[in-house]
Image (spheres, grey):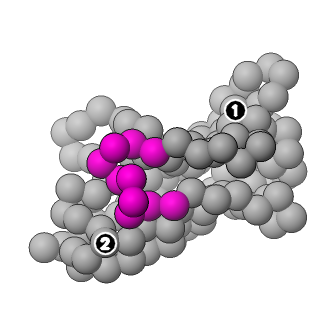
């Protein structure tokens, strides 16, 4: 089982930037899809951005044009570049991955992002 560990969360002012990282304990080439989800206070967990092994990306409408997802197979890492953040981006952000053949899912423990107004 590949473990996923997020980092980079913290407190940031509205309009600022933050970069989240997700380090995998093994090769991420086994995953066909990796993604970032978030769960705000009192809200359901939602998809923020996803990336497939061929580089295709998808974003929630609320973050399009502000967030960028990327993956580095050499470093076995997933990233989320967050720009022009808003208070409504405040949430725990989770790293997610799904295996190619078994479709087995893996989740990280999450990292807290708090945006102050």
Q: Quadrant of residue 96?
A: top right
Q: Quadrant of the C terminus?
A: bottom left
- Residue 73 in which image quadrant: bottom right
Local crowd at mark 1 within 10 Å, few (<14), some, or many (≥20)?
A: some
Looking at the image, can residue 6 be seen?
no
Residue at 70 percent of width and 58 percent of height: 71
Q: Position of residue 59 (x, y in %)?
A: 46, 45
Q: Secondary structure under badge 2?
A: loop
| Residue 90 percent across, percent down from the top left | 27, 58
The image shows residue 87, relative to residue 19, as above or below, that is above
Q: Is 86 left or right of 6, judged from the image as shown?
A: left
99 to 73, vertically: above or below? above
Q: Which residues are magenta?
A: 59-68
Residue 21 drawn in magenta: no
**Mark 2 lies on residue:** 84
Drawn side of residue 67 relative to residue 29, left or right: left
The quadrant the N terminus occupies is top right
Do the CB atoms of the residues marked 1 and 2 lie less than 8 Å apart?
no
Residue occupying the point 84% across, 22% down? 101
Q: Residue furthest top?
A: 102
Mark 1 or 2: in front is 2
Q: Identify the residue position indicated by label 1 in the image.
A: 98
Label 2, residues with CA under 10 Å away: few <14, some 14-19, many ≥20: some
**Which residue is found at the position 50% from the left and 67% from the top?**
81
Task: Look at the picture and state if 51 lies above or below 99.
Answer: below
């Amino acid at each position: 089982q590949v473990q996923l560990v997020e980092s980079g969360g913290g407190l940031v002012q509205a309009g600022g930037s933050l970069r989240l990282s997700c380090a995998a304990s093994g090769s991420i080439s086994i995953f066909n899809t990796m993604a970032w989800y978030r769960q705000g206070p009192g809200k359901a967990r939602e998809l923020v951005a996803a990336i497939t092994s061929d580089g295709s990306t998808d974003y929630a409408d609320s973050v399009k044009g502000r967030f960028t997802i990327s993956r580095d197979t050499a470093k076995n890492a997933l990233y989320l570049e967050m720009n022009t953040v808003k208070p409504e981006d405040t949430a725990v952000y989770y790293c997610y991955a799904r295996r190619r053949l078994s479709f087995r899912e893996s989740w990280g423990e999450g990292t807290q992002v708090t945006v102050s107004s």
